Image (spheres, rainbow, N blue to C red):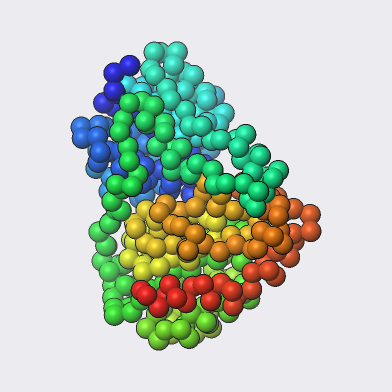
Amino acid sequence: MAVPERILAIRFSALGDVAMTVPVLSALTSQNPGLRVRMLSRPFFTPLFRHIPGLEFVGADIDRTYKGLPGLTRLFREQRAWKPQAVADLHNVLRTQYLRTLFRATGTPVRIIDKGRKEKRRLIRRGALQFTPLRSTHERYADVFRRLGFRLDLSLYRPLQPPLSGQTQTFLNLFRGQKIIGYAPLAKHPGKQYPPGGSREVIRRLLDARSDIVVLLFGAPSEKRLLDTLISDPDRVFNLAGLFDFASELEIISRLHLMIAMDSGNGHLAAVYGVPVFTVWGITHPYAGFAPLGQDGAMQIHPPLEQFPRIPCSVYGNKICPGYEKIWDALPPEAIADKLIPIVQTL
């Protein structure tokens, strides 16, 4: 097969999964001049892809406008009109399986992500203590395009830098001369979400470590009230939940000096912009391949595996191993702060 010049890439799903496609697609287009890529995903993610040269983003509301088989069939017809020469299925779920079947039926080559489901099941059975790191999700995405004939080296990725709107510029000017740390302590599942009391103590210790840092709290609008409880110093800790739209929030994240996040989407968003990311892990583990791009073990902390040998309890954190309900007791705020403070001191 000749190397295609027009590729349709597909990935719906959660924020973190989609965010991890951004550096891959950016590296792909920069390392393969002349390539045209169309990214098909949920409309909410539009701002993530605005600044990738050679890429066109198409938002498809698969829950309403393109719901069910009739909706997906219509979506296929619309995308086929763009005349892609290949399809990259970066999701491999029922919806994308249906779409790629239609494309194959019309003669369009398709390449599919290998999610490594068998390896991940073995990792869960054996635990990270008895395992080695699996291939990262970023590399699994990149492999799809390599199988289409493209060269793609993620080590050559150059972080994106979105321009600032007037609103975000005005906001960031409030912290001129200070080190801005993002903190995103919440996650979809309880086993990945650090307790609020512990987060408040981590923040207090960070503020004591340097007098010139401010902490911005990130979360969904529905999480605003919970995040408010983490504010110990209203002059240096600010809750951004619900204050900005997604595009503006990305602009702010791109100017952080450090992001502290759980195993969640916020860490991947910061990595897109080259921001150092420190991740805190609970019942999941970076060995499953979901660590932010470019962050090594020095930028991670998790409960001691000797004490909790069954970690990871699940790949996505939706299951807690029996007896692991109080796992955060083994990762007290002073342990997190002790690892963070040397990093903060070098900012």
Residue situated furthest right in the rendering: 323
Q: Where, by quadrant of the figure, is residue 28 drawn?
A: top left
Relative placement, left or right, of 194 versus 76 is right
Residue displayed at 41% across by 31% down: 144
Locate residue 124, reporting x and y percent: 67, 45
Relative placement, left or right, of 292 versus 36 is right
Q: Quadrant of the N terminus?
A: top left
Q: Nearer the viewer, residue 271 or 200?
A: 271
Residue 272, compared with residue 146, is above or below; it is below
Residue 245, compared with residue 335, is above or below; it is above
Q: Is residue 229 visible?
A: no
Locate residue 206, reporting x and y percent: 48, 79
Residue 42, compared with residue 88, is above or below; it is below
Residue displayed at 46% across by 57% down: 296
Q: Where, by quadrant of the figure, is residue 34 drawn?
A: top left
Q: Nearer the viewer, residue 278 or 188?
A: 278
Locate residue 62, reporting x and y percent: 50, 35
